Image (spheres, rainbow, N blue to C red):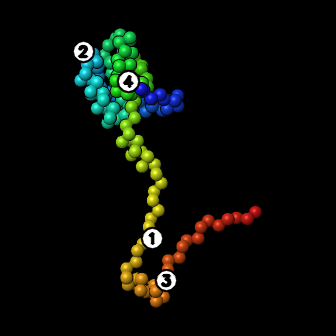
């Protein structure tokens, strides 16, 4: 089953696809098993790809788009002329993006050496003062 895209997601993918070049070209021999394997490999690496279909037959291009999307569980994004734009989410890349979106971890407090701990215990070393937060203004 192909995942469906909302209009906003489709628009964002079209905008991303505008700047990329075709990564796969379907030649004179048509949509063969080797071309489908290459499209699968490319989708794993890039998620969003452009495919150039070198045929003048519109119905054949639409049929190729349908076969590719159903066979590889991909989603059709756009078909303009001889260009087909296809998207398939890569779970590994999704995890990486989610990890990158997490807020940075708070730095841990610096550990003291035994000597520094002894000095702090005897009162020879002062504890580091915390910076005051933003002051609230009264109106």
Q: Please state the horizontal and vertical placement of residue 123, each as a whole percent of the image.
A: 48, 88
Quick check: marks 1 and 2 in contact, CB under 8 Å? no
Q: Is residue 87 above or below residue 79?
A: below
Q: 138 and 96: which one is in front?
A: 96
Q: Is residue 49 above or below residue 118?
A: above
- The residue indicated by pointer 4 is 69
Q: Is residue 139 in sight in this rendering?
A: yes
Q: Name the image quarter holding residue 50.
A: top left
Q: 128 and 1: which one is in front?
A: 1
Tag 1 or tag 3, which sits nearer the N-term? 1
- The residue indicated by pointer 2 is 29
Q: Secondary structure at mark 2?
A: loop
**Disc 3 versus disc 1: distance between alpha carbons?**
15 Å
Q: Is residue 127 above or below residue 37?
A: below
Front: mark 3 or 1: 1
Tag 2 or tag 3, which sits nearer the N-term? 2
**Disc 3 versus disc 2: distance between alpha carbons?**
79 Å
Tag 4 or tag 3, which sits nearer the N-term? 4
**Disc 1 versus disc 4: distance between alpha carbons?**
52 Å
Q: Secondary structure at mark 1?
A: loop
Mark 2 Cα-neighbour bin, 10 Å: few <14, some 14–19, many ≥20? few
Residue at 33 percent across and 32 percent down: it is 43
Q: Please state the horizontal and vertical placement of residue 117, each as a whole percent of the image.
A: 42, 83
Q: Give the quadrant of the C terminus.
A: bottom right
Instruction: Return the mark for residue 126.
Output: 3
Tag 4 or tag 2, which sits nearer the N-term? 2
Mark 3 Cα-neighbour bin, 10 Å: few <14, some 14–19, many ≥20? few
């Amino acid at each position: 089953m192909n995942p469906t895209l909302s209009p906003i997601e489709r628009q964002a993918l079209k905008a991303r696809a505008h700047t990329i070049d075709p990564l796969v070209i379907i030649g004179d021999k048509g949509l063969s098993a080797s071309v489908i394997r290459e499209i699968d490999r490319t989708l794993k690496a890039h998620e969003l790809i452009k495919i150039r279909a070198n045929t003048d037959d519109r119905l054949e291009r639409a049929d190729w788009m349908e076969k590719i999307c159903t066979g590889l569980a991909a989603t059709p994004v756009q078909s303009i002329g001889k260009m087909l734009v296809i998207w398939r989410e890569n779970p590994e890349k999704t995890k990486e993006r989610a990890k990158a979106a997490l807020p940075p971890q708070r730095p841990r407090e610096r550990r003291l050496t035994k000597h520094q701990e002894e000095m702090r215990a005897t009162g020879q070393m002062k504890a580091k003062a915390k910076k005051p937060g933003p002051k609230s203004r009264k109106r």
